[in-house]
Amino acid sequence: WALSVIAAVARIMVVRQDTRPVDKPEPAPQVATFTTQAGQRAKVTLSDGSQVLMAPRSTMRITDGRTVELTGEAYFDIVHHATQAFVVHTGTVTTRVLGTTFNVRHYAEDEAVRVAVASGKVMVGGSVSAAGRRPASVTLVAWDIGRVTDSTATAKTVGAVSDYTDWMFGRT
């Protein structure tokens, strides 16, 4: 219950701190690209009602209603769908989820993709190599932080994911 209240307050605070006013975000089209500049954040509502808060210097391409390609960082609040996973592609790493809240970070200069789970459960892993080699993967639950490269996947549990989501409140 406490996490729900904190999440609700965080969403209100984020909207008020956004660099452009967002009273009622418009649903994103099925295929679209969104980009933020340095110092800018953007809130995007996907066609299924899921919401994404994009960090500065990020690009998100929606390839269908529940699949996105991300360069940069974004916080996802995904609507549960029992039969269709939500998928985030970041470089050679794929994050799959049915419904949860989590942060994904992978800028061009980052050597690994970092995933911080606030609630729910996600599976994170690399792409199958051209030689057919199975990539490293890890399953993360609430308060887990995952770090994935082309060859490794590690997880650690932390007391809170706030160190990984402070950018949402301008505290980075």
Image (cartoon, rainbow, N blue to C red):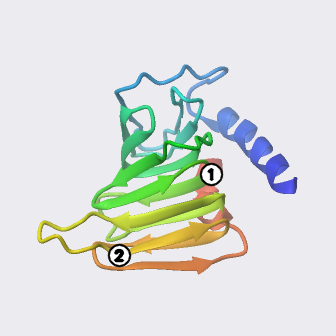
Q: Is residue 75 above or below residue 26?
A: below
Chain-order first, disc 1 or disc 2: 1
**Number of labelled discs?**
2
Residue at the disc numbered 2: 136
Camera-side residue of 28 and 13:
28
Camera-side residue of 168 and 69:
69
Residue displayed at 58% across by 40% down: 81
* Label ID, residue 111: none
Residue 167: percent from left, percent from top: 58, 54
Seen from this angle, which residue lies furthest left?
Answer: 131
Mark 1 or mark 2, which is nearer to you? 2
Judge left or right: residue 120 versus residue 52.
right
Q: Is residue 137 above or below residue 75?
A: below
Q: Quadrant of residue 94?
A: bottom left
Question: What is the spatial separation of the Cα atoms under label 1 and label 2, in whole angstroms?
Answer: 22 Å
Of the residues shown, which amino acid type is indicated by label 2? Ala
In the structure shown, which secondary structural element does the residue marked by tag 2 occupy? loop
Camera-side residue of 109 and 141:
141
Residue displayed at 56% across by 49% down: 98
Of the residues shown, which amino acid type is indicated by label 1? Thr
In the structure shown, which secondary structural element does the residue marked by tag 1 occupy? strand
Q: Residues within 10 Å of mark 2 (few under 14, many from 20)?
A: some
Judge left or right: residue 41 versus residue 163.
left
Residue at the disc numbered 1: 101
Residue displayed at 87% across by 55% down: 2
Seen from this angle, which residue lies furthest right?
Answer: 1
Residue 120: percent from left, percent from top: 65, 58
Residue 14: percent from left, percent from top: 67, 40
